[in-house]
Amino acid sequence: MRIALFITCLGDTLFPRTGQATVAILERLGHAVRFPAGQTCCGQMHVNSGYAAQATGLLERFVRVFGDDGVDAVVSPSGSCAAMVRHHYPRLAEEAGDAGLREAVASLAPRVFELSDFLVGELGVEDVGAYFPHRVTYHPSCHATRVLQVGDAPLRLLRRVRGIDLQELPEAAACCGFGGTFAVKNADVSAAMLTDKMEAILGTGAEVCTALDSSCLMHIGGGLQRQRSGVRTLHLAEILASTDAGGPAHA
Amino acid sequence: MPDTGFPAAARTALADTQLRRNLHVATHTIRDKRLRAVAEVPDWEELREAGRRIKQHAMRHLDEHLETLEAAVQRAGGTVHWAADATAANRIVADLIAATGEREVVKVKSILTDEIRLNDALRARGITAHETDLAELINQLSGDTASHILVPAIHRNRAEIGELFRRHLPDAGDLSDDPRALAGAARAYLRDLFLASRVAVSGANFAIAETGTVGVVESEGNGRMCLTLPDTLITVMGIEKVLPRLADLEVMLQLLPRSSTAERMNPYTSLWTGVTPGDGPRAFHLVLLDGGRTNALRDTTGRQALHCIRCSACLNVCPVYERTGGHAYGSVYPGPIGAILTPQLTDLHGGRTLPWASSLCGACYEVCPVKIDIPTVLIHLRGRIVAGGQAAPRMEDRAEHAGMRAAAATFRRPWLYRLAQRVGLPVARRLVRHERLMAALPGPLGRWGAVRDLPAPPAETFRDWWRGREETP
């Protein structure tokens, strides 16, 4: 399978270890991965904030960078960015009124996958050979759960991690309060939601909260760190990439 | 948007600890009950899809259905009135009441009459409207407004209601806070009103075009009293409530009760067709209100907001509503549906901050019985408001607009994007070491930094790491 990585602008710039972990997992499973260097941002921030018109160029760029026939799957360690492409690109291409773009999106969007969904749903793998001897709780981020409907794929992967002490998160489906620019436009409501999410996480006694989106984790982790809670956030990919020989999470 | 509209109102609401507690208990209770009620129905997803199709079809051919409805109602002995806006609707209702010579009317709970501020308009004409729904009665007695579509006094607990009743209801001086006792006191008070009133005003959940049948679903029986006892019944209804066929009720009456009160069936479903000699009201008037709905239909993405059957499931599951309550929305339609309905009914003049009152978590879409894609409509309306708001934007809007344009220009050019990383990361590395300074900054960074640290930016980007890896033999 020819796999192209869509690493996302946030992952590229602020969370390179998540991307490195994604590479490590896929290569460990015997797949060659490519990183098309022309990629930047899917335009989620623009589209979700009311600047869809400015995002059309980003949509065209995404299709140009990833739309070549040599790619079987585009894999991304972000539920919300994958959801943007799969769920919103078709509508945006339709609204842009460009028939060529519409066709290109229709062909590409179904081949774009969130990492856990790809591992379990496409590759049929649950045990990726990971070792992570820590107490962990999993927060199902909203776009992966409700838009991509990844279901229990992340939990299936986590349950097969050796050494892990996986704790169920109470009120797991509740949004953490990130919501992109929501976090700063409605900062007070966002903070109230974050408080409840952190309380649920702390109640599990976990050392690590994991999820499928670096953006949500930046918000949750930022809150946990501000409170000096002793709990950190780690992207699912980094847990799955960890082995008893060490891994990105131990680096 | 800066701290006006919803963000400012939400800030006040979030600080009200009693409100937070009342809302948390109420929304979580109804949320869990709804899940159980829906889980009993094996074909729930098919029902939702059927509901969506019925409403979509009804809206596509709204003009025909409305004319069919008008003819059917008139045939059955009712009278149909058309109102372009709230003022017209209020005038029609007030004129109809004045013609009966009555000065007091009883009302069935109706959000539409809140939307058009009917009670205020009637008061200006010397007519007193008595709310008979328990929660509406509570709000009317306390001079409060509804904060929820289905449970208008959801922001109150029984201790607050007990105190209110002891103060306002006759012979209620030693009333306890027991819900049964409170309901009993309201029942005794309302019964006298029902028996004395000769005119009633209602809204409608549905109207069936082919038969001219109008329907109200409710739980308390106050509606049944109002719809059957008085001589004159005046129903005010938004034009989007029309359904083509009586058979459509089979779908809607399964979707609505389970989604709203989490009941298999609501206790009272009243359906009436015109007037029946010797049974019920002798005169029936149906006032059909446009009130911005035709205008909203022009937006092909946004118009699905008109499919709403007012179940309020989206309010109950919304993490924002759960914490702020309905009043923060500044609209009779609060919560996720209010955030997409209010701006559209006012041609984007009202509720301009509401489309941002959502984290786009999608819980609303998941429960909507007619599958309104609320997150997509929210995003779409954000776009319309941003595009229309550039003529006289505020400072922060201008800054945001410039920032978004610059970001898009950067993301379109990989060389510029890499340059921004190279210049920006060292700055960010220095900034995150000063969390207190960051929290003091104006604008988005300060609002982020108020409660959250930023992650320490990495020494190298992913793409730098990848390039290094490729160059290593």
Image (cartoon, coloured by chain):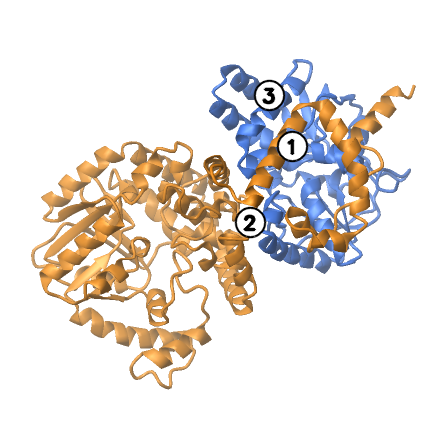
Is the Cβ of the residue at disc 2 closer than 8 Å to that at disc 3? no
Percent x, y for residue A113?
Answer: 65, 29
Q: Which chain is orange?
A: B
Percent x, y for residue B446?
Answer: 68, 51
Return the residue at label 1: B407
Would you call the spot at circle 3 few (<14 residues within 10 Å), some (14-19), or many (20 or more)? some
Residue toward you, B191 or B21: B21
Return the residue at label 2: B2
Q: Amino acid at mark 3?
A: Glu
Would you call the spot at circle 2 few (<14 residues within 10 Å), some (14-19), or many (20 or more)? some
Q: Relative to B319, is B140 above or below?
A: below
- Label 1 resides on the chain identified as B
Task: Determine whether the residue tagged by mark 2 lies in a helix, strand or loop.
Answer: loop
Disc 2 or 1, which lies upstream in sequence?
Answer: 2
Return the residue at label 3: A60
Would you call the spot at circle 1 few (<14 residues within 10 Å), some (14-19), or many (20 or more)? some
- In the image, are marks 2 and 1 on the same chain? yes
Report the Cα–Cα distance between label 2 and label 1. Answer: 20 Å
Percent x, y for residue B97?
Answer: 15, 60
Percent x, y for residue A135?
Answer: 79, 52
Report the Cα–Cα distance between label 2 and label 3. Answer: 32 Å
Query: Residue drawn at (82%, 30%), measured in percent from left and top?
Result: A24
- Label 3 resides on the chain identified as A
Q: Amino acid at mark 2?
A: Pro
The answer to whether residue B361 is visible is: no
- In this rendering, position of residue B243 left or right of residue B398: left
- In the image, are marks 2 and 3 on the same chain? no
Q: Relative to B164, is B145 above or below?
A: above
Which is more foreground, mark 3 or mark 1?
1
